[in-house]
């Protein structure tokens, strides 16, 4: 299953807070997305804050200047670490990469990141350069801050237990029901408090639905697949972006889908692509991010021609407005027909059928079963008194 408690130690991150009530505290971060809620201590444990939260959330108390943000990285590439500042206006969200063992700042919060198996740099260990003199009043304020922090932490734990326990329990039950088969299924938490099961194909969708129906979950999970989500996205784009030239929604990783669009026929600015990505993200509550990727039309055509040639299938190409059609034609035997159908299904599964399409036209071999041809000057015996000499190849 996608919900896994084992993590690659060498690729986990550690965050160290360099200011605020939690200055000096360190937290271990696992791959994926972590939400940081940075607020005044008096607001951290309010019901408004804890009502709509993903499972991986850290609360950072800060007197003023707090800005919520997301940190995202993957085990396979811990060097690609991204910070995304969140604001009330989704159009102004800022995203940038983060460096390890460097002083980072978002709003008034100052922190640093390192790999779990690395040591802190001297710059981080010495931050801040000057240590303030501890006076009696400072000591009293520190003790008060520790007591307040303990109360806040307890309140947050109690508030979040009810939010997290139910989804986690349901996820564990689904984990058992689906036999931990992470090759066929992936369990996803949705921002709408719904559990999703991503199945690899339609047969697995039916099997998962039957298993979930026989389970004891009070709240049934929603089973999705690449084909069904593409069909749903096609309907949504038809209503909202009817002129968009796209190929397909690629869902190799359901948490990070990619919408492939035409570089030549879908001229979108960076701002328009970002806006489209945000609107799509609202339609897919289980996804962390949806990227809009431009692909050259020539690349899509070349992929089709390469596969046809590799399978040694006879074809003709027909160019028309808005697309290309490859017509596989001839007297195909059963093996060639099977290869052609498998090629078309695999191509549509990856690229869709909006731009490149296939047609199969079967023709009877009028010489089949007549006789044999031998050598370059050979012939075919049509009947006892009829000989056919084909043109040389």
Image (cartoon, helix red, strand yellow):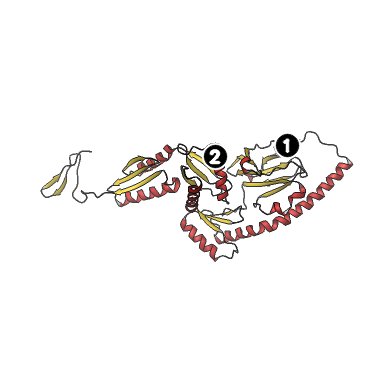
Q: Secondary structure at mark 2?
A: helix
Q: Quadrant of the C terminus?
A: top left
Q: Does residue 30 appear in this view?
A: no
What residue appears at the point 64 percent right and 43 percent down from the top-left corner?
89
The tag on residue 124 is: 1
Q: Quadrant of the N terminus?
A: bottom right
Residue 117 position within the rendered picture, expressed as x and y whole percent measured from the top left:
66, 42
Q: Are marks 1 and 2 in contact (CB under 8 Å)?
A: no
**Can you identify the residue that label 2 sits on?**
272
Residue 199 position within the rendered picture, expressed as x and y whole percent measured from the top left:
51, 55
What residue appears at the point 65 percent right and 47 percent down from the top-left corner?
34
Nearer-N-terminus badge (1/2): 1
Residue 162 position within the rendered picture, expressed as x and y whole percent measured from the top left:
69, 58
* For discs 1 and 2, the disc positioned in front in the rendered view: 2
Which sits in the foreground, 78 or 152?
Answer: 152
Q: For mark 1, does the 10 Å Cα neighbourhood hold few (<14), some (14 to 19), or many (20 or more) residues?
A: some
Eyeballing the image, is 217 above or below 116?
below
């Amino acid at each position: 299953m996608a919900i896994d408690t084992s993590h690659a130690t060498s690729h986990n991150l550690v965050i160290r807070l360099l200011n605020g009530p939690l200055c000096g505290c360190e937290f271990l971060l696992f791959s994926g997305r972590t939400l940081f809620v940075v607020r005044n201590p008096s607001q951290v444990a309010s019901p408004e804050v804890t009502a709509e939260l993903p499972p991986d959330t850290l609360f950072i108390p800060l007197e003023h200047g707090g800005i919520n943000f997301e940190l995202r990285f993957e085990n396979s590439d811990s060097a690609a670490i991204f910070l995304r500042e969140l604001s009330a206006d989704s159009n102004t969200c800022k995203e940038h990469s983060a460096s390890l063992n460097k002083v980072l700042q978002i709003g008034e919060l100052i922190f640093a990141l390192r790999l779990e198996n690395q040591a802190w740099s001297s710059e981080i260990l010495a931050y801040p350069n000057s240590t303030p003199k501890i006076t009696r009043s400072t000591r009293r304020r520190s003790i008060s801050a520790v007591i307040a922090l303990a109360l806040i932490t307890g309140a947050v734990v109690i508030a979040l237990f009810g939010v997290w326990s139910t989804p986690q329990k349901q996820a564990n039950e689904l984990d058992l029901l689906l036999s931990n088969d992470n090759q066929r299924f992936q369990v996803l938490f949705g921002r709408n408090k719904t559990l999703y099961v991503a199945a690899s194909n339609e047969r697995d969708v039916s099997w998962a639905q039957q298993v979930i129906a026989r389970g004891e979950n009070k709240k049934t999970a929603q089973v999705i697949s690449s084909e069904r989500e593409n069909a749903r996205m096609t309907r949504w784009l038809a209503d909202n972006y009817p002129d968009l030239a796209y190929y397909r929604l690629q869902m190799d990783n359901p948490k990070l889908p990619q919408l492939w669009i035409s570089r030549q026929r879908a001229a979108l600015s960076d701002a328009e692509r970002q806006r489209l990505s945000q609107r799509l993200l609202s339609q897919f509550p289980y996804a962390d991010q949806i990227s809009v990727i431009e692909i050259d039309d020539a690349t899509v055509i070349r992929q089709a021609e390469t596969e046809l040639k590799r399978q040694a299938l006879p074809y003709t190409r027909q160019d028309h407005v808005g697309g290309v059609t490859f017509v596989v034609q001839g007297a195909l035997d059963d093996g060639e027909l099977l290869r052609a159908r498998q090629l078309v299904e695999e191509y549509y599964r990856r690229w869709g059928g909006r731009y490149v399409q296939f047609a199969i036209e079967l023709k009877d071999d009028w010489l089949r079963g007549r006789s044999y041809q031998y050598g370059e000057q050979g012939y075919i015996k049509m009947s006892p008194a009829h000989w056919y000499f084909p043109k040389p190849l």
